[in-house]
Every structure is written in C-alpha cells, then in structure tokens.
Amino acid sequence: QVRLVESGGGLVQAGGSLRLSCVASGFTFSSYALTWYRQAPGNGREPVATISPNGHTNYADSVRGRFTVSRDNAKNTMYLQMNSLTPEDTAVYCCGWTSYRGQGTQVTVSS
C-alpha cells in the first residue's frame, strides 16, 4: 500500500523559512522521481519541485532560487526547504509519486 505523509507546515512571517518533509512507503523509493505540489485557495494544483532518483532537480519559475528539494533514500524521505517566503506561497503542499498524492500540509505566510 502506497503512503505519502507530509509534515512541517505552519504559519510563518514573510521572509521566513520552513522545511517540509514527505515520508513515503509502499514502493521502491530510491528508484523513482518525486514531486512537491501546492494548491492555493481558488487555484488548481501546481508542481513546485521535482527530484529524480539521482538527485537531478527541477523547479517552477515562481520558486526557483528560493526553494530547494532534496531526498534521503535511506530514510525514504523527500524534503522541501523553503526560504524567503511570501504570502503568495500560502497553499497546501503535498508530495506525489505517479498518481498518488499525500494529504498535504498547510503553509501560511503572513505579510
């Protein structure tokens, strides 16, 4: 059974930082690319960052240079370090593998 469990969200002031975690189980974590998504109120879900099995990364233009995705294959965990946060980053963040998505974690950035 595939499980994706996110944590690390919260309320932060503009300019602050948060680190999200996604713990995965039910598949061979080290063999697959994974993606962080976010969905703000009234908007569709958008991909934020993707990391390949060998660590190659790709970012949405809106977060490039501020967010860093990483993975620890020994812990079946993917991370998203988010710096210089703005109110526009407020959203529910979830991780994804193929068609599976976690429940998500809320990130709220106050101005």
Image (spheres, rainbow, N blue to C red):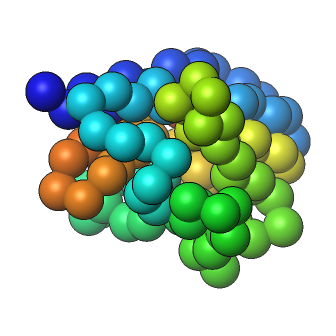
Q: Is residue 46 left or right of residue 42?
A: right
Q: Is residue 7 left or right of residue 60?
A: left
Is residue 34 positioned above or below 1 on the image? below
Residue 8 occupies quadrant: top right
Residue at 29% from the left image edge and 39% from the top image edge: 27
Q: Quadrant of the N terminus?
A: top left
User: Residue at coordinates 68% horizontally, 52% vertically from top-left?
Assistant: 69
Quarter of the image containing the C terminus? top right
Q: Give the answer, above or below, for where 8 lies relative to 94.
A: above
Q: Which residue is drawn at the image coordinates 34% and 49% (left, top)?
A: 96
Residue 53 seen in the current view: yes
Camera-nearest residue between 9 and 42? 9
| Residue 86 visible in the displayed image | no
Observer-nearest of 62 and 77? 77
Residue 24 pos. (x, y %): 39, 30
Name the residue: 65% across, 63% down: 54
Q: Is residue 17 above or below residue 96?
A: above
Q: Nearer the viewer, residue 60 or 85?
A: 60
The extreme bottom residue here reads 61
Query: How far across and how far down the image is residue 60, in percent?
Result: 59, 74
Is residue 66 rendered to the left or right of residue 92? right
